[in-house]
Amino acid sequence: MYNFVQNKLREWNLSQWVDKFKDEEITKESLFFLDNQDIAELFPRIRERLIFKMRLHQLKKEQSTNQETADFSAQVLPSTSSKGKRKLDHQDESQNLQPSTKRHCDTEERILYKVKEIMRNVKDQINDMNDNKELRALLKNKISNLETNKTELIGVFGKTGAGKSSLINAIINEKNLLPFGSVSACTSVMIKVEANTHSSKYEAEIEFITKEEWHKELLSWHTLKKGTDDYRDMARKLSALYGKEWENQSTEFLMKDEHFQNIPKLSEKSEKKSLECNTAQELSEELFKYTKDGSKHEDGNTAQQWYWPLVKCVTVRVPKNDLLQHVTVVDLPGNGDRNKSRSEMWKQVVGDCSTVWIVAEIKRAASETEAWEILENACGHIGNGGQCQRIHFICTHSDPSDDRVKINMDAKKKVKNEFKELNMINKHFTEDCFKVFTVSAKEFLEDSCVKEDDNEIPKLQDFLKNLNKCHSETFIYVSGAYGILSLIEGARHRKQGVEKADDVSKALEENMIEQLVQVETAVEEAIKAFDQCLREGVNNSKTSEEKLKSFLDRKDPSFFKTLQAVVKKDGTHITTKGEQINLNVMLASCLTDSIDEKFRKTFPNDVKGGLFNVISKFSLGTESLIQKYKDVELQLIFLQTEEDENKTQVNKIILDQKKIIYKSLRETIEENMKKCYEDAKKIEGDGAQNNMRTTIERYVYSNKQMYEEAKKNMLKKMNYMKTTIKKELEETMKESIKHSLRTYACLLPVFSEQLREVKKHYDELKSRQDEEMSHQQLDLFW
């Protein structure tokens, strides 16, 4: 019986797992009762798991004697564990999807598996080629690049106690994943929640700040004045790590390794600690001391050390969760952090979020000052300076009550009205981007059969499903494979079309030149428009100076301490109340205000319209050429797939560049103001507040050239973007034309059958994608 299993594993090219199956005593009989969880434990990597599942599925069909047996492998079956006890697989990999969606995903999984198998075999045969090394290298590289893992980022904001952790747990159907409870959540730690694609375990990766960064923070503590925001913030960190032992201690003592025994030794580079658990509950308990804030002697007996002051980011990986297949949910601090590396990571992640969830309790959602301040402070990073397409305001604690419907409706109306009044946010987003949801995580976790009208967590789950659909790994892979196989077969028949290839090549290059002119012209027109807007912004610099004067004239008795903190940190400061002060943004506002509306239309975050529309129209005219030159049809099909891939890459370049372009205005002002802040830091003694105020005002009024410099810098970056995207389009397409039409016939393997099969899958997926596209767009903004 064991020989049967061993022979099958060898037949399926899984011979390295023979010993594993023997150790688990898996016989011919038990082989047919393995379920998804058993298979996941036997094969940690997805590739082998998919191969085994497909082969086992085929074997079951061969062994079946009736339709019921034939359908056996498609069911969630009772299975026999290694101890012989029967069990049900309650964690099927498609557990979160509706039946119709589940069948759809199973079909795509089979297609993806089949095409990946084909391309692995193609790559193996290409490795044996001795002829045309350049083509061999090109093909191997293109096959390797088929593997993509694009992920949508959802950033979750909200003050402590709003219910962010419970909300995330409920939406992804993991009741005990993220820690929550009476102990305060740490406001500095960023927590990413994503799918575990290589193991059936619950895992976490904790990234710490560097030794140098912590040493700098400790050194700065001795320079802080008691009673200031920065002093209280640092005292909170020190108490979390050292209890009361930090008082009156030297920096050298606090840097000793004995204080960090349960984490990787702090080093010159950022260190990481990995956790692996069998259940969400176990992982949650392990994460507690890295993500929560409390007293070192919280229980009165056992000393509990809290490591969050040293944590930069925590990445949690959840197994078997379809909602996270192409989505990462990030629990974000509201205003970044005083630590430079954490602040930079915060800006990067926030700028990459395609969706933002603002979480607030329903009872005071519309009047929740902190929630709206978080959104206003982040809007520059997620709007024109980012790529956010949707803002969802989520009202939590909408628990069952007699007047629940009325409460929900009133909350939605008030929140929407409040959004309309926020002029700063409306410069970056339209009302169409803003949706309001009312939820109760507690109710959903206790009873998933809730009414969607009362509790809208199911709607948020549907939103995640639709995001996953929009990034189908299967279609991207199959499309690329179709192009590669077309190139190979076209090269094999090169002699048949050699006479016309030069004509086609010439026509393609002429079309490309014409199209590149249109792209270049569109960017130049945008540059001219921004030049005009920025001229007006420079002339309106007085508006920024008035904002600065209003800030400097504050009458608050504690304002001097705030002002000192601001100049000490080069114009930025976050108060203990959460107020984010940034004089550089304030001064740059005359410029950003002048371009915001035009910028949003030129670089829309949904990658539709503006310059993205110009790129979508870029075409080499392959469709019409296919009709005219049938002899090189395969080569032109390859060029079509290359063109689509290239335009996707160019859109990504534009999206990345537009963030750099937008924030350059602030960065130029920031650089110009450094000398001012250095001078202000030195001011002490009687009248220091007035002298500091006067120093800043005089510097700004006498350095108006910094606005002109910021304008020139932004336009320079626009020109750089124009050159970059033109170069990307031109060089990539020239290379593709060269390899498709000017590669002479060589001793390539024959892949005619593989091309026919992949084309069949491509046509099927393309038809399905076209049919679903309009529905997906409606679903995303319902």
Image (tube, rainbow, N blue to C red):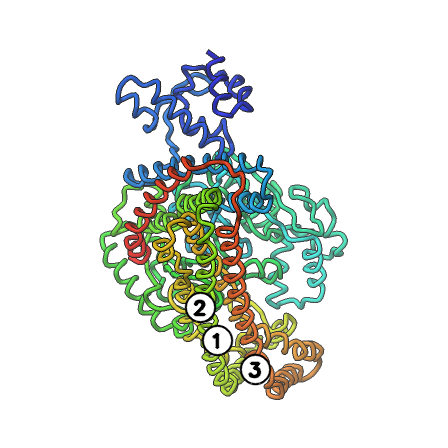
Residue type beneath disc 1: Glu
| Residue at mark 3 to residue at mark 2: CA–CA distance | 37 Å
* In the rendered image, the vertical position of residue 750 relative to residue 62, given as above or below: below
Q: Nearer the viewer, residue 263 or 152?
A: 152
Q: Nearer the viewer, mark 1 or mark 3?
A: 1
Relative to 450, 605 lies left or right: right
| Residue at mark 1 to residue at mark 3: CA–CA distance | 22 Å
Q: Disc 2 designates what residue?
A: 514
Q: Nearer the viewer, mark 2 or mark 1?
A: 2
Between disc 2 and disc 1, whose residue precedes? 2
Q: Disc 1 designates what residue?
A: 524
Q: Position of residue 338 (x, y in %)?
A: 60, 63
* Disc on res. 762: none
Residues packed near mark 2 inside 10 Å, few (<14), some (14 to 19) or many (20 plus): some
Residues packed near mark 1 inside 10 Å, few (<14), some (14 to 19) or many (20 plus): some
Numbered disc 2: secondary structure: helix
Q: Nearer the viewer, residue 749 or 2?
A: 749
Q: Are marks 3 and 2 in contact (CB under 8 Å)?
A: no
Q: Disc 3 designates what residue?
A: 707
| Residue at mark 2 to residue at mark 1: CA–CA distance | 16 Å
Q: Are marks 2 and 1 in contact (CB under 8 Å)?
A: no
Please report the residue visible at 31 percent of the width from the left and 69 percent of the height from the top: 417
Q: Position of residue 577 (x, y in %)?
A: 51, 66
